[in-house]
Image (spheres, rainbow, N blue to C red):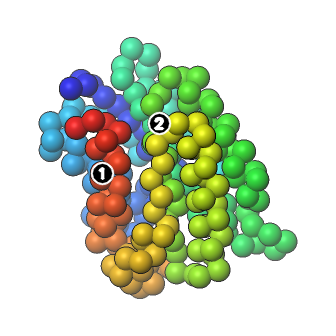
């Protein structure tokens, strides 16, 4: 088993666990599961509320380098996209082609650092039209990751059919669930997470 494994979770407010009364989000729950299984794991939550892929592409590498020093096993989990697809006057915050280009650049740079990668797709919100845009971006992201051999776990379709997620998002701010919603998100991710870490 890998010793002193360090993982950076990079992304937006869903990575940060916004709305979770237990302050764990899905990343904290996955970390806790791995630790209970005996994995010597240190995790760093680098989620920032409101950030789109362009913001994340500009900051993530320096933040991860300081936490994943040479000689220590390091990995990176990325998750973003919901903020890219927010409707603004004249289009979306980040157009789809730019979002995909940002993802390609991030994956290429992470490969240069030799960090194993996992990508978690953007989850749904309480807005049908917005969810359609999220689903379209999710499909593009999944294709990019498949072409580059990066494990990808989609969430938007499965969470859209999850009553706990949808009810909590609706009762909250329209985007973020509470603790139970994040617990369900973590359960969805768990099989892929365990395969990625091989435990």
Q: Between residue 117 and residue 86, name the one nearer to us.
A: 117
Residue at the top extreme of this rendering: 71
Residue 35 as seen in the image, left or right of residue 138: left
Q: Is residue 21 above or below residue 36?
A: below
Q: Secondary structure at mark 2?
A: strand
Who's the residue at 40% across and 27% down the image? 74
Q: Classify 15 as above or below 128.
A: above
- At a point 39% along the width and 40% down the height, the residue shown is 44
Dot 2 and dot 1 residues touching (CB under 8 Å): no
Q: Nearer the viewer, mark 2 or mark 1?
A: 1
SS state under label 1: helix
Crowd rating for badge 1 (residues with CA inside 10 Å; few <14, some 14–19, many 20+) = few
Q: Which residue is most to the right?
A: 90
Residue 15 image position (x, y, % from top left) = 45, 55
Label whose residue precedes the other's in the sequence (2 or 1) = 2
Which of the 4 image quadrants contains residue 184? Answer: bottom left
Say whether residue 3 is left or right of residue 104.
left
The residue under the point 70% across, 52% down is 99
Can the viewer see residue 125 in this picture?
Answer: yes
Residue on which the image places disc 2: 117
**Dividing the image into 4 quarters, which one contains the C terminus?**
top left
Per the image, the residue denoted by label 1 is: 191
């Amino acid at each position: 088993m890998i010793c002193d494994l360090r993982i950076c979770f990079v992304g937006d407010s869903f990575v940060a666990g916004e709305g979770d009364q237990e302050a764990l989000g899905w990343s904290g729950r996955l970390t806790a599961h791995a630790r209970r299984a005996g994995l010597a794991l240190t995790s760093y939550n680098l989620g920032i509320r409101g950030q789109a892929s362009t913001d994340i592409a500009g900051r993530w590498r320096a933040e991860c380098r300081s936490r994943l020093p040479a000689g220590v096993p390091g990995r990176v989990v990325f998750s973003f996209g919901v903020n890219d697809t927010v409707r603004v006057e004249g289009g979306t915050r980040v157009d789809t082609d730019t979002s995909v280009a940002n993802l390609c650049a991030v994956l290429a740079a992470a490969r240069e650092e030799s960090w194993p990668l996992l990508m978690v797709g953007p989850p749904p919100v309480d807005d049908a039209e917005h969810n359609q845009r999220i689903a379209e971006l999710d499909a593009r992201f999944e294709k990019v990751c498949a072409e580059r051999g990066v494990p990808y776990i989609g969430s938007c379709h499965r969470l859209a059919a999850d009553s706990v997620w949808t009810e909590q998002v609706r009762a909250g701010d329209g985007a973020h669930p509470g603790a139970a919603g994040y617990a369900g998100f973590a359960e969805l991710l768990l099989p892929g997470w365990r395969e990625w870490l091989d435990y």
